[in-house]
Amino acid sequence: QTLKNQQNQTLPKSYTREDWQKGYESLKQEYDYWIDEIEGVIPAELQGTLLRNGPGLLDINGQRLHHPFDGDGMISKITFTNGRAHFRNRFVETEGYLAEKKAGKILYRGVFGTQKPGGWLANAFDFKIKHIANTNVIYWGKKLLALWEAAEPYLLHPQTLETLGNEYFNGVLSQGEAFSAHPRIDPNGKLVNFAIKPGLSTTITIFELNTNGEIISKQNHSVPGFCFIHDFVITENYCIFFQNPVNFNPIPFALGMASAGQCIKVQKNQPTKIIIIPRKDSKAEKEEVRTLETQAGFIFHHVNAFEVETEIIIDSICYESLPEVEPNTDYLKTNFDTNAPGQIWRFDINLDIKLSDHKVQSQLIDKRACEFPSIHPNNVGKPYRYLYIAAAHNPTGNAPLQAIMKVDLQTEKREIWSAAPRGFMGEPIFIPRPNSQQEDEGWVIALVYDAEHHRSDVVILDAQDFSKGAIAKLHLKHHIPYSLHGSFTPE
Ligand code: 3ON
Ligand code: FE
């Protein structure tokens, strides 16, 4: 099998679909063990905990979920101490997870197409969506939080990963209020996050938290139209949102024919709105909210943003269109060749130009299909040089993520480390070496699904030299279904 790339050469496929599919098997068991199968050496200076979240269950007692984004959150934790590594995984025990486990069948509707058994009649006029906690996990202000963008966070025990309940930040968050899965940590010691409350007009809420995990500011903005905003970016003075060009028709959802997420349709030829909101307690606090338009396709994730004098630069992963999760399709049968790849773009805004005269500049940074960017934590919201991202093995065309790409935004140099043909890449995370001087001094760590052994590896690369190959590969005793996001904490 081959695919045509834009230069009209044919590149052999770097994977088989059967291998890729196996990474979507549920992992039902919860483990707790020291990892003893290690190739290479874990750097002694690497101390701390890698946290991952993602769907652990892709079926409920054999009833398949319609889409992985509907899967119950499962936390994996890999702790590095003195050259050794310990693994633990545990499900987030949400109300829905516990109820479905007990019943042994699907009891709720999911956002991405999962329906209760019994056809549309069994689902019609049930507006209750299953609240899961599968998208990200952070340790902030001594709280371990599992995040999902449409509801409040779950608080977990930092050692045992036991679910302790919901987190409301001393009542500043109210019951049912969202707290997105994409907080940004400003290197000055603030965690900034947002929430989307969609409707005919949408409320965007912005939270800033101090290092004690307390919400120190909360501000609301109403924007016209329905929003599906999964991620945002911060700079020193602004929070920036890209309002994807979508519309929402709730009728099939109400009638039980489709889930809420399936009623969102991308409007390919409509512009994306860029909403620039001044941060509380910043120099820009008194400025108005600015809204600009550009053509950006669909965006889930941004890499970073920063200010240079009166300009704002934003780097994002853009899709020309979004493969819709239609009711009668099977995600395991995805045809990568006909889906648009995610690609890194740079947007350039000049705040000095009158809004009505403004044309947002945009430029493609790399053609390669990629997703899940990471940068040095000290450069969040600031000028930066390096990014790391999961990427396809081949430089063009669309394919599953199998490699890690490092992009030097200054020299345009790229480095690639690939796990193809039988390895599938998760989100890479950059971890700075303690007391490091250079921006790329540290490690890149990712979970790789190895289809040959049906297990996952924790792979560690030297961020300054991918050509060395993996400096350590930690073989787990089992696989971890493809995860979404995570973080590293030195504690
Ligand atoms: O828009 C409204 C507001 C809102 C926040 C209505 C709504 C109900 C659709 C909604 C909820 C949105 C939710 C719950 C979004 C959840 C997203 C999620 C769990 C994951 C997104 C992942 C994105 C990507 C790009 C994943 C890529 C994965 C791979 C490349 C394979 O490993
Ligand atoms: Fe995300």
Image (cartoon, rainbow, N blue to C red):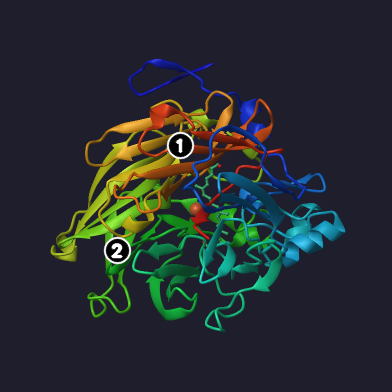
Which residue is pictured at 23% across the width and 75% down the height? 284
Q: Nearer the viewer, mark 2 or mark 1?
A: 1
The quadrant the N terminus occupies is top right
Q: Is mark 1 within 8 Å of ligand 1?
A: no
Judging by the rendered image, the residue that carries numbered circle 2 is 235
Question: Is residue 396 at least partly visible in the picture?
Answer: no
Q: Is mark 2 within 8 Å of ligand 2?
A: no
Residue 331's spot in the image, x, y percent? 63, 39
In the picture provided, is 109 more to the left or to the right than 145? Answer: right
Image quadrant of ligand 1 equals bottom right
| Helix, strand or loop for disc 2 | loop
The correct choice, above or below, for 144 with respect to 24 in the image is below
The numbered dot on residue 287 is none
Residue 428's spot in the image, x, y percent? 48, 43
Judging by the rendered image, the residue that carries numbered circle 1 is 461
Q: Nearer the viewer, residue 243 or 471?
A: 471
Identity, as a three-letter code, of the amino acid under mark 1: Leu
The correct choice, above or below, for 26 with respect to 283 in the image is above
Q: Residue furthest bottom?
A: 171
Question: Is residue 118 at least partly visible in the picture?
Answer: yes
Identity, as a three-letter code, of the amino acid under mark 2: Thr
Residue 150's spot in the image, x, y percent? 57, 65
Local crowd at mark 1 within 10 Å, few (<14), some, or many (≥20)?
many
Which residue is pictured at 34% across the width and 57% down the height? 378
Q: Nearer the viewer, residue 280 or 335?
A: 280
| Helix, strand or loop for disc 1 | strand
Q: Nearer the viewer, residue 454 or 55?
A: 454
